[in-house]
């Protein structure tokens, strides 16, 4: 079992996203295999509970595309993480973006600590810098669980540079009830189930070979946000998300 001090807690990188068709995914992943390999987890289930104010203050601000924005979520990796084991390690995460650079800071805690801290606004379970930052957000926003968003993910890392990462997300789904990670990973499709979300994560510039592969595939960069898409299209009721065209440009915030 993963322990509280075995995982990386701070990330700083540029994240670039692409919505791919199934054929584009096959082409891109096949070509990337020359330079990258699937990481130790293989295909994994990602489960996230996003927290926000009752009037969705954090995501509304994020969709305005300010220089600085932030999100708060509770996340697990792997199907077994949803089975309600109170000692299972989960991650309380702050995801910040400033001038195009993503800063992800996460605090590993147990599920029962997460319940007491994030759901019942109890005292923070650990006295770390990241825990104090999360505590500040809890005090400032007084957030509540807003939505569950899950997906299946294949993650790849560079053979020569492990800091170069690419993730492919499938079956992106959401639910508005049962907003605890222990309540499973089922939900409605958030976008076309044939679409695949690619996120390229690099400390600096994207390698030229990757740029060329994406150009050959006809992949188009997008500012797609899972939580943002949920807010615009479910909360604001803009459209039927299961019919989302893979290459459609995102609409503005409602």
Image (cartoon, rainbow, N blue to C red):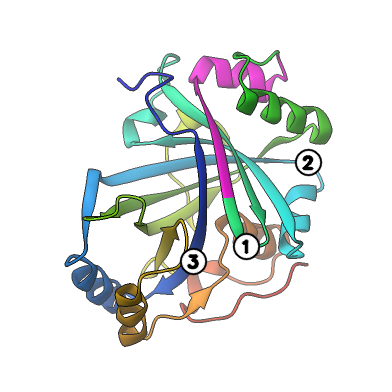
Report which residue position mark 1 lands on: 100
Report which residue position mark 3 lands on: 16
2 or 3: mark nearer the eye? 3
Q: Is residue 20 above or below residue 120?
A: below
Residue 53: give its label.
2
Q: In this view, does 196 lie to the left or right of 56?
A: left
Of residues 210 and 241, the one drawn nearer to the viewer in this rendering: 210
Of residues 138 and 78, the one drawn nearer to the viewer in this rendering: 138
* Magenta-tinted stretch: 103-122
Is-magenta flag for residue 118?
yes
Q: Residue at x 80, y 27 (%)?
A: 139
Tell which circle, 3 or 1, labels the residue nearer the N-terminal end: 3
How far from the left and from the top, in percent, is residue 115? Answer: 59, 20
Q: Badge 1, how many Cα within 10 Å: few under 14, some, many 20+?
A: few
How far from the left and from the top, in percent, is residue 232? Answer: 68, 64
Is residue 131 visible in this depiction of the protein? yes
Tell which circle, 2 or 3, labels the residue nearer the N-terminal end: 3
């Amino acid at each position: 079992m993963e322990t509280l001090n075995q995982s990386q807690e701070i990330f700083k990188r540029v994240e670039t996203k692409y919505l791919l068709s199934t054929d584009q995914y096959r082409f891109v992943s096949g070509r990337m295999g020359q330079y990258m390999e699937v990481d130790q987890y293989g295909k994994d289930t990602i489960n996230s509970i996003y927290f926000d104010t009752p009037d969705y203050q954090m995501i509304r601000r994020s969709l305005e595309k300010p220089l600085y924005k932030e999100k708060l979520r509770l996340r697990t990796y792997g199907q077994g993480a949803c089975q309600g084991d109170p000692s299972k390690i989960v991650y309380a995460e702050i995801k910040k973006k400033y001038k195009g650079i993503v800063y992800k800071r996460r605090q590993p805690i147990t599920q029962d600590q997460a319940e007491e801290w994030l759901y019942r606004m109890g005292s923070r379970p650990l006295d770390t810098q990241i825990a104090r930052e999360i505590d500040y957000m809890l005090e400032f926003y007084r957030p509540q669980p807003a939505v569950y968003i899950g997906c299946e993910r294949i993650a790849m890392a560079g053979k020569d540079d492990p800091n170069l990462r690419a993730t492919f997300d499938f079956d992106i789904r959401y639910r508005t009830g049962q907003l605890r990670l222990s309540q499973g990973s089922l939900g409605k499709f958030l976008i076309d189930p044939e679409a695949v979300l690619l996120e390229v994560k690099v400390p600096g510039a994207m390698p030229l070979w990757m740029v060329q592969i994406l150009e050959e595939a006809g992949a188009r960069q997008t500012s797609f946000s899972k939580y943002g898409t949920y807010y615009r299209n479910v909360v604001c009721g803009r459209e039927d998300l299961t019919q989302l065209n893979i290459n459609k440009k995102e609409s503005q915030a409602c």
